[in-house]
Amino acid sequence: MGKTLRDSEDALLKKITVANYQQDPYYAPIMKAVEALLREKGFVAPLELFIRLDLLSPESVENWRRGRIPYLERVIRCNLGKASRILRILRMHAHDLDLKPSLTVYKRWTKGSCPLLRFSKTGDHNIEAAYARHFVSPRKGSVGAGVQDVLVDSTGTDMTGTSARRETRAPRSKGHGNVLNGPAREKLMNNIGALEDK
């Protein structure tokens, strides 16, 4: 027997938990998009997922990356509750697939100073981290396999504006950062910790 509209509405009113997220109406399309992204790229980025779900246009992402849009949620074609729900389901599904979470720093695509981009109007740390967290396949030969991840922008610049030492890097992929480990990773993590303590 098929689900009725009322069943779908009731499912949306429930809080997403590890026990019930696979029954959520958004789970099937998210699962299909995640499988396709892993097959094509070896990782899943929330921005790519929203594009695959037709909730975000590549043009809007480019305008945001160039600083023409103040924060990404302004151009996502769904309400913030749905966006949050999708991010939560993605995180749980990625955990079940044993994908490795990897924080990504998004900087504006401009010449000269490259300020950090915002995903949300409020700039809340948890919301920003949810959008910036990529999930990398641990399989050998995939992007970032076997690397402790902290991502920086494609110029090798970390959040503090200092040049990051390039020790271990995954292959570059358009629009995404590079993977670092070693002293550069430790320095970046210390700087992030200091920002969180403020």
Image (spheres, rainbow, N blue to C red):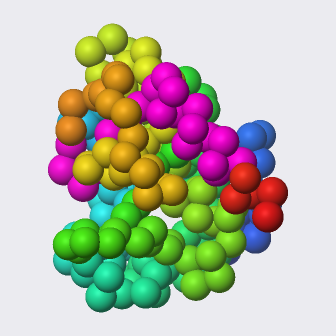
Locate residue 102, reporting x and y percent.
Answer: 50, 39
Locate residue 181, reporting x and y percent.
Answer: 46, 26
In this picture, is 184 found above or below 87? above
Q: Is residue 163 left or right of residue 194?
A: left
In this picture, is 146 found above or below 106? above
Q: Which quarter shows the C terminus? A: bottom right
In this picture, is 7 found above or below 94? below
* Range of residues picked out in magenta: 173-193
| Magenta-span inclusion, residue 86 | no
| Magenta-span inclusion, residue 188 | yes
Residue drawn at (76%, 70%) of the image = 13
Locate residue 133, reporting x and y percent.
Answer: 52, 49
Residue drawn at (56%, 77%) of the image = 120
Q: Is residue 191 left or right of residue 145?
A: right
Residue drawn at (51%, 56%) of the image = 160
Q: Is residue 27 left or right of residue 114?
A: right
